[in-house]
Amino acid sequence: MRKAFLGGVGLALVLAAACDDSSSPDPAAAPDAGTPSAVDAGGGTPAADGGGGSEDAAPPVDAGGGGGALWTETHHTCVLRPSGKIACWGTNDEGELGGGNKTPALSFVEVQGVDDAVEVGPGTNHTCARRASGAVVCWGRASDGQLGEGDDTKLESLTPVAVKDLSDAVEIDVGEFHSCARRASGTVVCWGDNAFGCLGDGTNDQRAAPVPVKDLTDAVEISASSHTCARRASGAVVCWGKNSDGQLGNGTTDTSYVPVPVTGLTDAVEISTGPYDTCARRTNGTVVCWGSNNSGKLGIGTTDAADDALAPGTSVLGLGDAKQISVGHTSVCALRASGAVVCWGSNNFGQLGNGTKDASGTPVPVTGLTDAVAITVGQWHACARRATGAVVCWGDNTNGQIGDGTKNASLVPAPVSGLP
């Protein structure tokens, strides 16, 4: 998943990818038709402020009009409100909206019992939030231990429960069935499903409470999906977990249960993970991606899966002024210094936001969006916060994840009802 924070007020996006799904085909390769399946979304978030991150890790932009933070996942979206409360909308099969029930919402509902949140991250069927104290709470599906409360028999929680023995988190990120937190010390802990080693503890054992990632003490940013990555204080990046498409960036397709260095990357200021890809924003504003190129997700000008990259190579074409990046399950978006947003990759549900359903191997502008301050990409939809504080979303809306009160897809940005 991936998240981004702006100025003193955060805006993050989180996408999750199946840590335990080794055989699922990349949905970006699916034809531009049909109803989305309940496949996990991958995605990302720039680094949260706090505890050692470089100043450039969080895009230095004023969130504007009420601030807040925005995250989206496969079929639900959450926004952090200026009050410290969290509003979520979309699917709610296992209580992932946190409203105390399983009723889906076409417009937002508030998470119960949380009024001091500073960060939020949704997975496929669970959601977590970091509190101002450094404690973390999670809610929704628990069958893989992803709520982190230490109970490996629990199936779900419709309201937030505390993650065990975690009181000093300065950043969280949520994969599909696992979650991670960066501590003030620069160490990282993860919990939940671990089938492909995405917890980084050297095993593939499921964990219902946080365990430390091995040999990582200088992390300044984390991003979780089917795999997990961390940016080190030096600008180097390490990743661990599933690697079927080369998403670990070390030149192989071998799964790793412990962090391995991304080849040749020493100047990253932001990272974002999807289930089959990873991208990094560099100090000069360029972006480089690696992993699967189905439907053009690497942004190198082709849509041919034969152009997959097992390590960072060609930079995304025509993009030298990125301020934030967000990797989704099937597409990637970047916020430019001007406030414009560009996206590339699959577009079968209009997730590129340019009024078409045509895939693109190079960045294309999101229609009418010139004042964005933060972005987030889900599986088949994406959202942005504008300088006014308003939130807009586009793409698939089968489960109400656009939040406009309907289930109608939108090929261009549509306002979320009732926000800010």
Image (cartoon, rainbow, N blue to C red):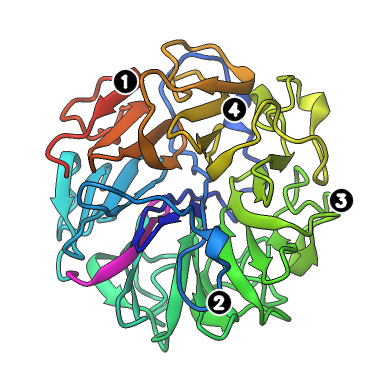
Q: Residue at x 54, y 38 (%)?
A: 329
Q: Is residue 226 visible?
A: no
Q: Amino acid at mark 3?
A: Thr
CB-based contact (under 8 Å), mark 3 and mark 4: no
Q: On the image, which quarter does residue 91 sit in?
A: top left
**Residue 409 bears which disc, if any?**
1
Image disc number at residue 252: 3
Q: Which residue is mark 2?
A: 52
Q: Which of the two marks, 1 or 2, is nearer to us in this view?
A: 2
Q: Amino acid at mark 4?
A: Ala
Place of residue 361 in the rendered image (x, y in percent of width and height, measured from the top left): 67, 21
User: For the residue carrying disc 3, how many other residues have a C-alpha within 10 Å: few (<14), some (14-19), or many (20+)?
Assistant: some
Q: Is residue 242 left or right of residue 330?
A: right
User: Bounds of the magenta span?
Assistant: 114-125
Q: Are marks 4 and 2 in contact (CB under 8 Å)?
A: no
Amino acid type indicated by mark 2: Gly
Residue reaching furthest to the bottom: 165
Decide which of 386, 231 is in the foreground and name it: 386
* Residue 316 in view: yes
Q: Helix, strand, or loop for circle 1?
A: loop
**Quarter containing the C terminus:** top left
- The image shows residue 224, relative to residue 300, as above or below, that is below
- The residue singled out by tag 4 in the image is 28
